[in-house]
Image (cartoon, grey):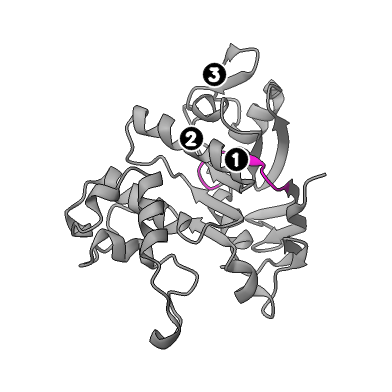
Amino acid sequence: MSAQVVSISDLSFGPEKSPVLDQINLQLEAGHFMGIIGPNGAGKSTLLAAIAGLIQPSCGTVELFGKPLNQFSRHKLLKQVGFLNQLHEHEPHLPLRVRDVVAMGSAGYAAPLWKQSNNRAEIMAALEQVEMADLAERDFRHLSGGQRQRVRLARALVRQPRLLLLDEPSAALDSKRQDRLYALLRSLCSDQGMTIIMVEHDIAAITAYVDSVACLNRRIHHHAMQGEQIPDDIWHAMYGDHIHIVAHDAGCIGCAHPTEEAQ
């Protein structure tokens, strides 16, 4: 039996009468690849932030690698976690080389200079994974949006994390790059035992790669395993009645965007 990497119990966040997250319970083992889908404002990014230790839940607990995530364990546990937050159009363009941006994700990046080790090999290996090694010396500011997104992913991968948290990692990537990204993530789970939690909007695009899909809108309405169709009432519970549901095949169910997206 695989080791448990993430265990969330009765997690809530936000005002009691109108929580952003409400009674989240989730357990994931090593090597599991889970996608999270849901409407805008559903709490998807907030859930990743709670797992990454960036926010303190109003109630409930988060355990990583079998240990509670708290102020005493946070620093040590998060060394084993990679995190890619959402790509924002107006985020600052850093006057740094590509490899310097990736180096920021190294576990020892903030250590004193006399304790830092030469991790160039790890940096280049991470850039190879995202097909950006040939641009290692390029100025990060001069990259396209898709290239910057791949560099940011390399920054999350450089520490070779046991747990990888991704918030819309395919943003700014074309369809071919998206497929290659999902294939890379699948191989990290299958070959290296990495556990990945990924927020995405297009369930049809990720179904062939993930092990499960969590349907989130403040709470987890359904956690579907690979090959399991998500019942129509779950879609309506998340998005309301303004939705059109289309079955793609026996192992995937997808949906068009609702005419009025839940907030």
Residue occupied by mark 3: 244
In the rendered structure, find residue 191 and report the number of the disc placed on it.
1
- Which residue position is annotated with label 2? 182
Give whichever of 179, 262 is nearer the camera.
179
Of residues 63 and 201, the one drawn nearer to the viewer in this rendering? 63
Among the two numbered marks 2 and 3 on one chain, the one whose residue lies closer to the N terminus = 2
Mark toward the viewer: 1 or 2: 1
Residue 57 lies, with reference to residue 20, above or below; the image says below
Return the x and y of residue 263 as percentages of the image width and height.
52, 44
Q: Quadrant of residue 16?
A: bottom right
Amino acid at dot 3: His
Q: Residue furthest right?
A: 1
CA distance for labels 3 and 1:
37 Å
Of 203 and 255, nearer the camera is 203
Give the residue displayed 21% in from the left and 59% down from the top: 137
Nearer the observer, 11 or 26: 26
Indicate the secondary structure of the residue bearing disc 2: helix
Between circles 2 and 3, the one closer to the viewer is 2
Residue at the (67%, 42%) spot, across then down: 32
Q: Secondary structure at mark 3?
A: loop
Give the class, few, some or many, for how many residues have Cα within 10 Å of label 1's Cα (few <14, many ≥20).
few
Magenta span of residues: 29-41
Q: Is residue 95 left or right of residue 64?
A: left
Q: Is residue 220 left or right of residue 102?
A: right
Q: Position of residue 53 (x, y in %)?
A: 60, 67
Circle 3 or circle 1, nearest the eye = 1
Q: Residue at x 62, y 62 (%)?
A: 50
- In what quadrant of the picture does the N terminus appear? top right
Q: Look at 71% across and 23% down and name the residue there.
A: 228
Q: Give amino acid for label 1.
A: Asp
Residue 222 located left or right of residue 191: right
Q: Toward which corner of the image does residue 251 lie, by quadrant?
A: top right
